[in-house]
Amino acid sequence: MHYTNLKDETQRVDFAEAVATGLGRNQGLFMPESIPRVDDPAAFLAQPFIERSINVLAGFVGSSIPTDVLAHIVREAFSFPVPVVQASPKTRCLELFHGPTLAFKDFGARFLARSLSYIAGDRKITILTATSGDTGAAVAHAFHGLDNIRCAILYPAGKISPLQEKLFCTLGGNIHTFAVDGAFDDCQTLVKQAFDVDALRKDLALNSANSINIARLVAQICYYWEGVAQIPAGDHDSLVIAVPSGNFGNLTAGLIAKAMGLPAKRYIAATNRNDTVPRFLATGEWEPNPTVPTMSNAMDVSAPNNWPRVEALFARGDLEPGILTGFVTSESETEAKLRTLNGYGYVSEPHAAVAFRALEERLVPGENGLFLGTAHPAKFLETVERVLGTKLALPEPLAAVADKGVLSVHIPNDFGAFERELRTRLG
Ligand SMILES: Cc1ncc(COP(=O)(O)O)c(C=O)c1O
């Protein structure tokens, strides 16, 4: 399997190189050159989750990782449940939040971490990243305990919730966390500056492992297959999958699954008011507006960086035109749908509620819906408790860290100070 750079087709790399470099030349995204087809989807769906996931990923990894190693990686990375639950009479939720950081990012981050660790071999790599909370947790847990990779994670001191901080700043070992006196943007600037210093980049073998890495994307394909596998076969032809979308990585993975032969009828790209894609799908005009804050804040993105991958799938004829539409949900409707779901006895959170609403509004008679539950409701505790007027119990991974001490180093918003700390701790 080869990957081509969507901005420079002369750059053609294997999986190992695509994973190790992240982005191609001219900041181009890597895309699988062709999508492996599944000959007998019904037989494929009958396989157990891990076995099927190994088979999905073998097609994308090619010869970069031997099958026995890949099997080991998948078993370790996907070591938590992925249930489909009935949420309303016509919809089910694919719950992707039962991993260590209670979010769908656990799938991609854990597969990326283990793939990169194998690909790095004897080399020691340092993952350097800035976070406003969620990504840091997924990355820290994914890489924790790996021999040849250390992580340095920067976040704005005092600007993430105490529980969020504890989720990734209490691990220790190869996970180094830095609380910066500044905003998230300042953290990002420090990270960029570090990558710009040649000596530092080489000395520590810096790598970003960011969200556009192809390893994250291919890992996410597996849970679409698992979601459909848990739905009775009679519902497959009328199945509509709604994906709560921000950067559109999740939807890209779903569409790749469809191009492989996943039995599902169509997809809905569900967004909050940051609606560049739904407007584009309706009008053909790409006109990003300024980003507006919403309660489904992980989807507050108006220039989604995975969109070129979706366009490539349609442009190449991997998918039939018309299987994707968009739908936009306002803040008040998001709240209303959280209450609707609660009325059915299902507690959800704002991102999933945006996708649920798309189904409620767009399913036609005879269709049934699957929406993706991308985060545990407790990760959006304040909003969910306010809207539903109830108290939520803390799930085990959050309760387990609540009393632990934060191990972060506090640093000023100053590159010199950051570089010194980085070299002292990781050099
Ligand atoms: C909880 C949650 N839901 C949905 C999304 C959107 O996913 P994507 O950026 O792949 O479209 C994110 C992204 O970070 C998220 O954290």
Image (cartoon, rainbow, N blue to C red):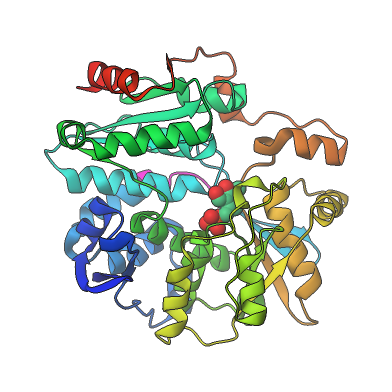
Reply above or below: 340 against 162: below
Residue 57 at x, y percent in the picture: 33, 63
Would residue 179 be visible to someone looking at this image?
yes
Reply above or below: 371 against 6: above
Reply above or below: 265 against 423: below
User: What's the magenta region?
Assistant: 75-82
- Horizontal side of 26 relative to 398 (left or right) equals left
Residue 77 counted in the magenta span? yes
Characterize the magenta stretch by its predominant secondary structure: loop
Q: Observer-nearest residue: 372 or 408?
A: 408
Viewport quadrant of the N terminus? bottom left
- Horizontal side of 119 relative to 384 (left or right) equals left
Residue 23 at x, y percent in the picture: 30, 57
Residue 212 counted in the magenta span? no
Q: Residue furthest left?
A: 122
Number of marks present in the image shown: 0
Residue at the location (46% across, 19% down)? Answer: 170
Q: Observer-nearest residue: 106 or 48?
A: 106
Would residue 90 be visible to someone looking at this image?
no
Residue at the location (62% across, 77% down)? Answer: 281
